[in-house]
Amino acid sequence: MNLVLFDTPSSRSNLLPFTYTRPLAEMRVGILKIAEKWKKWLAADVSFLTEEYLSVKYPPKFTEDNIYIAGNVCPDEVLVQAIDDLKPNQKLIIGDKLIASRQGKIDVAQIGSGCEAIELEEKFTQIERPWHIFKENGAQIRLDYDLITQGRQSRKIEDPYTRVYGSHHIFIEEGVSIKDATLNAENGPIYIGKGAVVEEGSIIRGPFALCEHSTVNANARMRGDITIGPYSKVGGEVSNSVIFGCSNKGHDGFLGNSVLGEWCNIGADTNTSNLKNNYDMVKVWDYTKSGFVNTGEQFCGLMMGDHSKCGINTMFNTGTVVGVAANIFGSGFPRTFIPSFAWGGAGGFATFKLPKVFEMATITMSRRKKEFTDSERQILESVYTMSEQYRVWEK
């Protein structure tokens, strides 16, 4: 079986800034990225049918017989069975939404064209807006936990000073270090990935996922529905948030109902507001509309794209959206939409020029022993051009 996870222009636009630098299925929700979920559920390799500028890093792979799956759809038992049952030139739909098709080599505009429609009436999880990532995270942690741990034995917690509640819902991979912490899995599972570290005094409530080689710093408070992606550091107080990976929020300060991309850094004592003072629904910047839309959510914090960073004591207002490779600093509350490659804060912005961005990315990635490749450079160059319309100070 050859799986091709496809993007549509409307879905990509609705999920900016995270889709500036990745296909839909490379978003992390739960323990795994969406692509990793499909790979495990269907025991098959995956590739991506996405924008041309992203294909330098995420090339599609075709055979004579391919299963195309919408990249923002999360698998479950019913969906997997329905997709597994597809015959050539059949497609799976739910209402007016195309979920999957089985066809030969085609481009994205032809997916589902000329196929017999099979309608599925069951509900499913589709990530359609950035805030859906943290909203669905707890449920996806539970599903991924069962998928990853089925038939396997957790490593034991050897430290005598670590307090555990709901131990049957805690899974520890090899090479983990946990010292003098509290782990409470009574409300949801806790997954600790290979080589991860939980430092002294940390309090962790499930559902919670700490992916491989990441660290929960000393005295951190993890309040549940949280995913910390691989090679990341987290401290302070965090609630219902997702960090895709290779990012730091290592110090005191609050992060709630938020999503951080990769290669981000949150300065010490930075705080995000996730609830308005009048308890009203939160509005956020919408790239499709080029204006603010109502999320329908009372709790919504910070959405930050890849390679963006903020200085110490930064204060983010409720529902702030930060693009790719922005650098935010200074006193006061910055605006609630910060375009990609912005440099500044409440006092105004200049443009973070590409040579300096490349220099920063090279240093940042080398700290994780990763190379800033030509494909990464080309992607950022494309995003720089696509996002220039939002840098109004340049006009």
Image (cartoon, grey):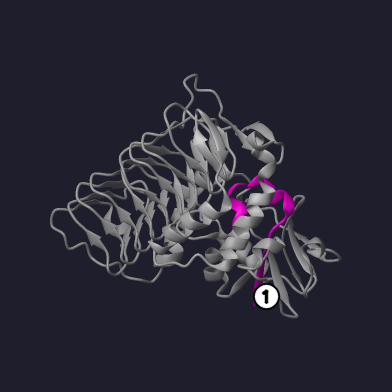
Can residue 124 be seen here? The reply is no
Question: As drawn, which residue projects farthest toward the left?
Answer: 160
316 w.r.t. 372: above or below: above
Is 229 magenta? The answer is: no
Q: Quadrant of the C terminus?
A: top right
Q: Amino acid at mark 1?
A: Lys
Is 2 magenta? The answer is: yes
Q: Residue at x 63, y 34 (%)?
A: 393
Q: Nearer the viewer, residue 157 or 373?
A: 373
Residue that badge 1 annotates: 61
259 w.r.t. 113: above or below: above
User: In screen coordinates, is 23 left or right of 356?
Assistant: right
Q: Nearer the viewer, residue 323 or 382?
A: 382
Find residue 50 and report its horizontal and vertical position in percent: 69, 62
Q: Give the magenta-colored segment's residue range.
A: 1-21
User: In screen coordinates, is 342 left or right of 8?
Assistant: left
Find residue 364 and report its horizontal and vertical position in percent: 42, 57
Question: As drawn, which residue projects farthest toward the right?
Answer: 114
Q: Nearer the viewer, residue 110 or 246?
A: 246
User: In screen coordinates, is 144 left or right of 387?
Assistant: left
